[in-house]
Amino acid sequence: MLSKKIPYEQQIFVCTNDRQGAGQSCGDHQGEAVFKELRRIAKDRGLHPRIRVAQAKCLGQCSLGVNVMVYPEGAWYSNIGLDDVAVLAEKYLL
């Protein structure tokens, strides 16, 4: 096993879970689109990979819409839509 320091200053996890109709999921609320837009902004601003925007297949809160976790801040956001991406980007993708 290799152990080392986390290679990112910040990590933003966006739930993209898609249960394909077998129950509520972040995929029902454009989780994939939210993820792609946050990652695009990070790359456009030259922040990737220093700030990592990653997919999370399930954060366990799909009934709350698209969920986003931000580390090391320990911030949690629920019910995120595409219209919220700009707000998150201005807060975390600087």
Image (cartoon, rainbow, N blue to C red):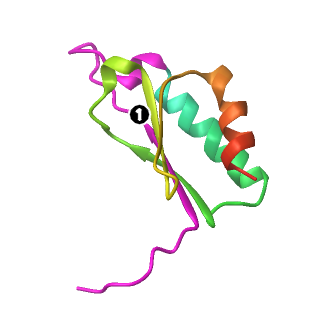
Q: Is residue 59 left or right of residue 78?
A: left
Residue 85: % across, % down: 66, 31
- On whether residue 13 falls in the magenta region, the answer is yes
Q: Nearer the viewer, residue 65 or 75?
A: 75
Q: Which residues are magenta?
A: 1-29
Amino acid identity at mark 1 = Thr
At horizontal 29% and vertical 86% (from top left) the residue drawn is 2
* Residue 38 sits inside the magenta stretch: no
Query: Foreground residue, 23 or 11?
Result: 11
Residue 94 position, x and y percent, is: 76, 53
User: With respect to residue 80, does 5 lie above or below?
Assistant: below
Q: Which residue is mark 1?
A: 16
Q: Is residue 89 left or right of residue 68?
A: right
Look at the image and tell me in which quarter the N terminus lies.
bottom left
Q: Is residue 52 above or below residue 65?
A: below
Residue 27 position (above or below residue 15) = above
Picture quadrant of residue 87: top right
Q: Nearer the viewer, residue 84 or 2?
A: 84
Q: Which corner quadrant of the image does residue 8 belong to?
A: bottom right
Q: Give the secondary structure at mark 1.
A: loop
| Residue 80 on image: x %, y % | 53, 24
Q: Is residue 1 above or below residue 69?
A: below
